[in-house]
């Protein structure tokens, strides 16, 4: 007996409606996985800017997504072009449809228009404008893809051996990777090779088309002696930062990759720099040996998705909403518990004021620092403004190190302890002026 086939669709041939369903399911799966900080790997480094001596390093050669730290390379290439007479600061460069169509953060350049190069330099340094990055890349390289190849080649000349660029902005691309060490090298090159342009990284705002455009490098505004460089964020990278600061005539450069929130990253960078300025160091060089021997002479003879923090909270909150789970502190990106714990810098002696929490007592300082880091990751945004404080206490059996986070009000301290307790992390609240 023959069976009619009318109305029967062959197995494996999806209808248009079926394809739409699968597409929606795919989008939902992506949304549920959207806070992709699991891809972000913590890494950090602090170097002496003049000698290249490494004062702190943790995962410094781990390849990560640089996000908008990429724009430091785009700016380096722009400064190179200006110095070689290929571009001028007051020159107007064309804005292609490709450049105008970049995802935020952006200045809102219009396709078919032109923009002054200096405005795009400020747009990248202050606002982290992706449309400006693409426009500058096209002005130098013809296409952004060709410019990315030029960036990678120049990076190799600078000694950035583990960096590959695929675009001018740092917008998501699986092949766009760098390391904390390489970004420290790039920061060093910007400061010494293009000293007369370095001031752009310290600008807090600029005027564009009659509007004041403000920056968002908040740590630079509050950390004594810090005068530049760059923030960065995409979901896959976490919160990145390259910073430079001067104290008593000595300049340091710090780089942090994979911060769980902007506040955590800023506080961690401040701690790392404080510790380095206090004199703790290891004798390793991040720069070439000739620069280390004669940095001033070498300055003259050296061979020649959505992005950033103004949109990051919206992106992460939207992803959480799509997954049907907006946690408290929506807009903050929290690393999973399995992430590598960032080694926190010890706070100088003298107890910070306010309420605090204690997350353990240990026989060595490093264990206390790791406990502080783990607690910061698990408590999310509650501890963004807390001050890491590993307190050394003398006992008959030797020193112990109490791992604390201080400088909070009572309500925040109690909420943080409650949240940590739910994750199985021990915690005690510490009132102001409490004994050791």
Image: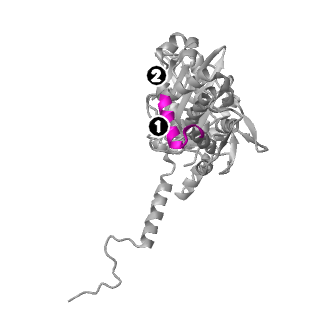
Q: Is residue 179 visible?
A: no
Query: Eyeballing the image, is 112 above or below 145?
Result: below
State the residue at coordinates (46%, 63%).
Answer: 23
- Select label 2 or label 1 by which is in front: 1
State the residue at coordinates (44%, 41%).
Answer: 175
Q: Is residue 258 left or right of residue 350?
A: left
Cα distance in 3D space between marks 2 and 1: 38 Å
Relative depth, front residue between 177 and 274: 177
Q: Residues within 10 Å of mark 1 (few under 14, many from 20)?
A: many
Q: Is residue 424 visible?
A: yes
- The answer to whether residue 148 is magenta is yes
Quadrant containing the C terminus is top right
Local SS, label 1: loop
Quadrant containing the N terminus is bottom left
Residue at the outermost right position:
210
Residue 421: x %, y % from top left: 52, 42
State the residue at coordinates (48%, 20%).
Answer: 286
Q: Are marks 2 and 1 in contact (CB under 8 Å)?
A: no
Residue 341: x %, y % from top left: 47, 34
- Most common SS among magenta residues: helix
- Residue at image mark 2: 363
Coloration of the structure image: one colour
Query: Eyeballing the image, is 90 above or below 99?
Result: above
State the residue at coordinates (57%, 19%).
Answer: 49
Picture quadrant of residue 142: top right
Point out the stretch of residues depicted in magenta: 139-155
- Return the disc, 2 or 1, that comes first in the chain's sequence: 1
Q: Residue 177, labelled with which disc?
A: 1
Local SS, label 2: loop
Q: Is residue 98 left or right of residue 206?
A: left
Q: Residue 36, labelled with which disc?
A: none
- The answer to whether residue 46 is magenta is no
């Amino acid at each position: 007996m023959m069976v009619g086939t009318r109305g029967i669709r062959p197995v494996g041939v999806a209808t248009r409606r079926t394809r739409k369903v699968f597409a929606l399911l795919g989008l939902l799966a992506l949304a549920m996985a959207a806070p992709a900080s699991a891809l972000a790997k913590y890494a950090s480094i602090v170097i002496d800017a003049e000698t290249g001596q490494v004062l702190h390093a943790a995962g410094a050669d781990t390849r990560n997504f640089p996000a908008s730290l990429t724009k430091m390379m785009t700016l380096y290439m722009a400064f190179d072009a200006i110095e070689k007479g290929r571009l001028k600061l007051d020159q107007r460069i064309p804005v292609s449809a490709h450049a105008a169509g970049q995802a935020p953060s952006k200045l809102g350049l219009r396709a078919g228009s032109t923009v002054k190069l200096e405005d795009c330099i400020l747009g990248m340094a202050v606002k982290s404008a992706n449309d400006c990055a693409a426009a500058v890349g096209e002005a130098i390289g013809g296409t952004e893809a060709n410019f990315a190849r030029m960036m990678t080649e120049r990076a190799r000349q600078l000694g950035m051996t583990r960096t590959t660029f695929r675009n001018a902005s740092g917008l998501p691309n699986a092949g766009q990777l760098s390391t904390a060490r390489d970004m420290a090298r790039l920061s060093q090159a910007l400061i010494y090779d293009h000293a007369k342009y370095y001031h752009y990284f310290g600008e807090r705002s600029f005027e564009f088309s009659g509007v004041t455009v403000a920056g968002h490098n908040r740590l630079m505004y509050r950390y004594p002696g810090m005068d530049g460089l760059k923030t960065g964020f995409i979901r896959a990278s976490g919160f990145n930062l390259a910073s430079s600061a001067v104290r008593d005539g000595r300049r340091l450069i710090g780089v942090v990759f994979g911060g769980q929130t902007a506040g955590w990253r800023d506080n961690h960078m401040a701690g790392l720099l404080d510790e380095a300025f206090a004199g703790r160091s290891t004798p390793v060089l991040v720069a070439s040996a000739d620069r280390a021997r004669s940095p001033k002479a070498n300055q003259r003879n050296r061979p020649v998705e959505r992005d950033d923090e103004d949109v990051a909270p919206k992106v992460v909150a939207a992803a959480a909403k799509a997954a049907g789970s907006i946690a408290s502190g929506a807009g903050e990106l929290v690393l999973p518990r399995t992430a590598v714990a960032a080694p926190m810098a010890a706070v100088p002696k003298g107890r910070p004021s306010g309420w605090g929490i204690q997350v353990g007592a240990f026989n060595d300082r490093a264990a206390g620092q790791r406990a502080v880091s783990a607690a910061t990751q698990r408590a999310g945004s509650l501890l963004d403004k807390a001050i890491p404080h590993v307190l050394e206490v003398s006992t008959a059996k030797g020193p112990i190190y109490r791992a604390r986070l201080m400088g909070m009000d009572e309500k925040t301290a109690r909420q943080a302890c409650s949240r940590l307790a739910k994750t199985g992390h021990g915690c005690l609240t510490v009132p102001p002026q409490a004994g050791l």
